Every structure is written in C-alpha cells, then in structure tokens.
Image: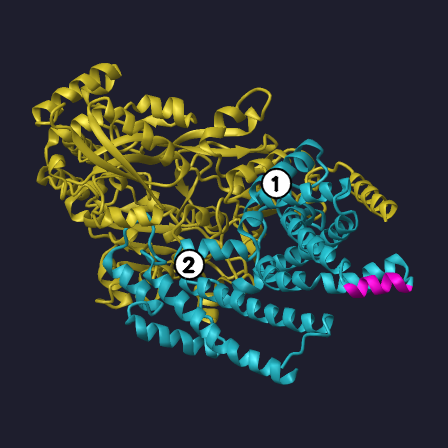
Chain colours: A cyan, B yellow
Amino acid sequence: MVRFLFRRLLVAIPTLLLVVTVAFFMMRAAPGNPFETSRKLPPAIEKNMMAKYGLDRPLGQQYLTYLADVARGDFGPSMKYQDKSVLQIVREGFPTSLTIGLSALILASALGMTLGVVAALRQNEPADYAVSAVAILGVCIPTFVTAPLLVLLFGLKLGWLPTGGLAGPESLILPVTVLALPQVAVISRLTRAGMIEVLRSNYIRTARAKGLPEHEIVFRHALRAAILPLVSYLGPACAGLITGSLVIEKIFNLPGLGKNFVVSALQRDYTVVMGVVILYATLIIALNLLADVVYALLDPRVRLA
Amino acid sequence: MRIRLAALVVAALVGLGGCKPHGAVRAPCPAGERCLEIGNVTEPVSLDPPKTSGVWEDRILGDMFMGLTQNGPDGLPRPGMAQSWDVTPDGLVWTFHLRPAVWSDGVPVTAGDFVFSLRRLMDPKTASQYGYLLYFIRNAEAVNAGRAPLSALGVEAVDARTLRVTLTHPVPYLPQVTMHQTFYPQPEHVVRKWGDAWSDPAHFVSNGAFVLKRWAFGDRVTVVKNPRYYDAGKVCIDQIDYYATGDAIAAERRVRRGELDINDDIQSNRVAFLRRPDQIPAYVHTHPYLGVEYLAFNTHDVPAFKDRRVRVALSMAIDRAFITGKLLRSGQVPAYGFAPPYTADYTPPPPPVWAAWPIERRQAAARALLAQAGYGPGHALRIELKHRDPPDSALMAPAIQADWKSVGVQTDLVQEDSQIAYQDFRLRDFQVADGSWIADFNDAMSFLGLQQSQTGAQNYGDYANPVYDALLAKADLEPDARARAAYLARAEQIMIADAPVAPIYFYVTKDLVNPRVTGWVDNAVDLHRSRYLCVKGAAGSAR
C-alpha cells in the first residue's frame, strides 16, 4: 500500500509538469496579452507593463523562470488584478467553491444512491421508471436552464430564497441544488446498474438462502459492491465540483473559483490561469488516487501494489 | 422502504416550505446606519489609483478620493481639493490653491502629495496604463518612457497648499481631467511606508468621503464614511458595498428584490420591458452618454474603400433610426457625427444633408454613388464586417448587412471576442470594423483625436488628412475655448464628409435605481458620487 502510494505520487510529478507546460504554451499562443484593452497603449506604456511582468523576455526563459517560481511555491502576482497575488485569489475563491461543491456532492450522493437503490429493487416497476425519468431529465436539462427556472420559482414568485449573492446559509440552497441535480441523475443511474448486477450474483443468492434480513442484504452486502463504479466516477467529479462552476457562480453571483478560471483565460491573465490549472490538475490526481484507495478498501479482490 | 422514502420527501418539502417568505437578503447594516448596496458591473483590477483604468474602478475610487476638482451630482467639475485656481494668459501654467484638509489618518493633505502622486503615475516602474492621458504635462512623456528623471515632470509644490502644473500646450479642459482617477492624490507618508501594499485595506488611507474597509475578491468592496472628510457633515450614507455584477439580468433580479439599491447597467433589450407600468418603470434611468458606436473602413488594404464615394454610400445606406428605435430600444441616439452633441463646450457641425432624407431616398443616392464608383448589378461589391461580441453589436451587425444588401452590397459577418477584435482592428486585419469609443474626459478632443493621422493603430480607418490634422493642432494651441471649439467643429465636418468612419449611434447610460435612493442625477459621464446620495426612511431600516 505504501509502495503503491509512493509510486503514484512519483508519477504525479511528470504528469503535473506536462500539464503546466502544455497550459503555459497554449496560453501564450492565444492572441492578445493581459494588457490589451479597447484602448491602444502608447509604446512607452506597453513597454513599462511588459517589463514589470517579465513578458519582454524570450518565451523559453519566461517558462523556466515560471517553473522555478512555482517550485518555490511562488505563483506570482495576477497580471490583471494588480493588488492580488494568484495565491490570494485562489485562497479567497476556493472556500466558497469548496463549500458549494462539497454540499452538492453530499446531497447528490445521498439522493442519487437512495434513488438508485430504490430503482434497482423495484426494477421495471413504476418507481424504477420514475427514477429513470428524473435521471434523464437531470442529465438533459443544463444548469443554465434549471438555475433561472428555480430562481424564478423560489426566488421571485414564492420569495422563499435569495436570488443571488452570498449572505447566509439560505443563499446556498439554490446553487447547491442546481449543481447537484445532474449529479443525482448520474449517481442514481450508476447505483441502479451496479445494484442490479450485484443482486443477481451468487453471494447475494447465498445470503438470501441463509435467510438474512433484506435490509442487511441490501445495505451490507450488495451496496458495498454496487457502488464501486460510482467511486471511480466520484473522484474526478469531485475535483470538478469543488473547483467551482462558471455557470452557477455567474447566475447566482457567487465569489467562487470557477469564474476566475474562465474570466482569467479570456483576459489572458496568464499567472491566474496557470495557478488554477495547477490546482485543478493536483486535485484530479489526488482524488483519483483517493478513489483507488477507497476502491481497494471496499473490494477485497483489489490489491494495491 | 416506500414509507421511509415518502417520509423523506415529505420532510424535505416541509423543510423547504418552512422557509417563510422573507424580505431581501441584504448585507448586514450596523444599527442606526444608512447602507447602500451598489451593483458595479465588474471587479476592480486594483484600488491603487494609478494602476486602474476602468470606470468601474473610478466609481469606487471617486467615493474615496478627491482630486483637485470633483464631479458634482450632474457629473460636471466643481472645486475639490483645489478651492480655486489661476491660469497664465498663454494657458500653460496652472496654479491650484488647496483647501485645508486631512487624510483619513489625520495627516494633512499637501501639494507635495499631488506632486508625489503624479510622479508615481509617470514613473515607468509603476507601469500605469492610463498615464498617457496626462502627457500634456511638461516632460510627462519623457519621464514615462524613462528618458528623464521624475523630478523633470512639470508639477511642483510652491508651498504646502499651492500646486503648480506646467503644460506643453494649453488644455482649457484641464478641470475636466483633474477630477479623473489619474489625478487622485495618494498619501505620500503611507505609500513610502508600505510600498505597493499601501492599498491593502489594513493600510489604506484616503482623502474623500469614504475609506476602504474590506475587499472580498469576487464578491464585494466595502467602504465606510470617513469622519475626517472636510465635508463629512453633508454625507448621509455610512457604508457602501460595491458588487461585481457581471450578469445584468441577475443584477436586475437582485435590484427587484431590494438586495441591491443600484445597478450600473441594464441589458439594452430589457429597458423597454422594465419601463412597462406593471414592471419597475420608476427604477429605470437612461441618459445620453459620452460614447459613440461606429464603423471604420480599412482604407489601407481594401481598394474599394480608397474611394470616398463608396464609404459615403455605405454610411448613407445604414438605417440608424431602425437600429436605435427597433433593435436597441433604450434611448440610443442615431449618430451622423463623431462627438456627441452634448459634449461640454462644443457645438457640433450640422449633420450631412442626407441625414434628414427618408431611408429610401438615401439608399437610392447610395446606389447612384456606388454605380459612379463602378459597383453595380454586374460588379457587386463584396465586403466583410468584423464585429465584437457584446449583445448590442451582435444585434446591430445583421441590420447593417441587410441595409447594405438593399444597395447591392454583399456583406459577410464575422463575430469575434471583443479583445481579439480590437487587436485585429489595430493590426488592420479587417475590412469593416465595428468600433466603440467612450470619452476619457468630457471634451470633443477625446473623440476627434482618434482620427488624427498621428494616432496610429487606433485610427482604424487610417484617416490622414493634413487639413484635419492642422485644425486639431491649431485647436490644441488655442487658449480661447470658443475659438478652439470652432476649430474642432470645422475639423469634424471635414472628417465626416470624408467618411473614414460611419458613426452609428451615441450611447446612453442605463442604470437601475431603487426610488428610495435620493439625490441621484442622471448625467452624461454616468458618475454618481455616493456623497450626494441618501436613502429614504429611518437610519438602520435598510433591512
């Protein structure tokens, strides 16, 4: 197990380096620079700005300097938001994205797994079809449609919940729900499929023959094996959720990290884009690793070595 | 199982239903205080004045800093830190007499602070984007390019309360510029102590009506009343939150719910709807704005556009009234000139005669002009219109395409991300460009300078007319405001007749303002300083 972890962490380093390199050069290949506006800057001013951020040096040299800085934990200043460093921007945005993402993940897992189990136990009965219908709707309707509709209903017509901003826990209800809905759909489908397969297996038949109570069969023996595909799905999904969602943050006006990702790419804020890419890549790697570990804990057949 | 699930669903519904309809979720306001929640479109890039260039930053900075002059409620300049000023007859040396005032930490504001701030603005190390606006100060350009020491800049503190500014040419509109964000003073004693970190809320010091309290990135900037402001007795608001409300529709919902008092933008095609009696007509404010939307013709690379008749014909054929009245519908004004008619100290030249003709007659004349230039049914002109991606540009482009089709011109539309489009325009990688220009200061020169041949990259149409250049140069050297305005108007008339650009419409300001906010005056620069605003109702009743 320790050797497995060590090896995976060792592989993570070249992976990260590759991601950083590709992102660095793709960003620089995009037309424009962080100081482009509708105004043309006089050459003297443009020169001052480029010099201040080292953009006047050869690209290769910029890349090596950047790598050296990152290795020392220095992600540099934002090129657009001059009062803030990349770390500050990530530190200020991440807690909001983390709260919303994790809440959505927990809500989606609880709801999705419950629905999936119900659907599997009532296979081809009305309850199963109902869950399938909900799941297909959840996957098909994009968040930028569900969000305004829920805001219209609960925010404007009923007036129960705030329509946006971050003021108190009630302002989290709508964004978390909207973010969770498509995940509920995916999770319930995965759970249902896993459950159906497992419920037909020999050891469940044995358990039934032994006369174990139904809840023990379902929750202790079947579910544990049935959620294995779910675990592999949740690793990367979790990384995606907790790094924030542009759509949710824009519609609900939340100060999360997702907006920064897109906005900083559009504004060519090189250092912020790089910082967010590195964070995202690290999370994906870490959570995939975690998924593998959980997998081994759940399934005695899997040996990590 | 079924029972348990049903119980869960019921519990969830009861839980949700248990949320009683409550009022707006406003940011908490301390008891007994008056708070204002303002939607300010986008995140400030910095709160250190020389590092900013956006009007959204100035909305915050202008509440915290006071330049030599300041915006009145109507947006026009009035004495600020300078109680009065004298100008030498040649218009080159301005002496400002400062009022006794202190920074929010109690230290007096001096002429030395202004000298320090202007040198800091021009210091190449500061890398200010907007420094070029003050290149009319003596030696400013050389200092900014690093060719002259900071001390060479034409600003000096005669004594603690007298500031002398020396210019390279007369700038009769200087009081318009001295209220601009490039002219805000910074506290020398604080900047020297903390360096670039001085604008951190922990160290921040200002001389205006409000002072920075908190900046939660991506969420809001909070400022509170500065009790040491010289006119603090007249300031009604105690605390302001500015939110980055990039999505105008989401902001509109928050204004409706009372979560925001003001939002500085409305999506154009919502204005007419919101003005309906069953909507929120009393909230909607529009006013002519100092900006122009125009098309530029690439006379450098497109042979057809080297012919003046083609450019005039294309300009003539555009049905501007349809674009403003039927598409944008929020009070934009059709433009036949380049500087808006409400520009300060300016009387624009009469529009071209065809402006008053019905569109059918204009299009017939346009076809005739194109025929003279050799384009007609047998030899149709085919061009590409490259436009930016904001909703208004995307609405306008197909209308222009249709107008040109009716005079026999085939137009291909290419839409691009604004930033990339502007870069293409500068590199002349376009045939027809949809440009947009918002004035830096309220003066015709801020518009007409764009078509000067020396403007270079931003003179998208590469207009170069020695007569036009000479008239603008003459205006620059003319200390008398009226004579200067006449030169500018003559120049504009010549330029419009040459049609290197086709102006489409003048912008409007679009603000949503809760009627409980008092003191709001619509104005052409769309700046509404919070020190003039108040809210109806008892203090602390903002919730």
Q: Quadrant of residue A305?
A: bottom right
Q: Residue at x 49, y 42 (%)?
A: B529
Say which amino acid is labelled 2. Answer: Lys
Q: Nearer the viewer, residue B325 or B54?
A: B325
Q: Residues within 10 Å of mark 1 (few under 14, many from 20)?
A: some
Measuring from the top left, give residue B160's x and y in whole percent: 39, 60
Kindly identify which residue carries mark 1. Answer: A146
Say which amino acid is labelled 1. Answer: Thr
Of all chains, the one bearing label 1 is: A
Label disc, if present, on residue A80 of the rendered structure: 2
Element carrying mark 2 = loop
Measuring from the top left, give residue A113's x and y in whole percent: 73, 54
Part of the protein shown in magenta: A202-210
Q: Of the residues under marks 2 and 1, which one precedes in the sequence?
A: 2
Label disc, if present, on residue A262 of the rendered structure: none
Q: Residue at x 62, y 61 (%)?
A: A233
Left or right side of A151 for B455: left
Residue A207 painted magenta: yes
Compared with residue B288, is residue A110 higher up or lower down, i.e. above or below?
below
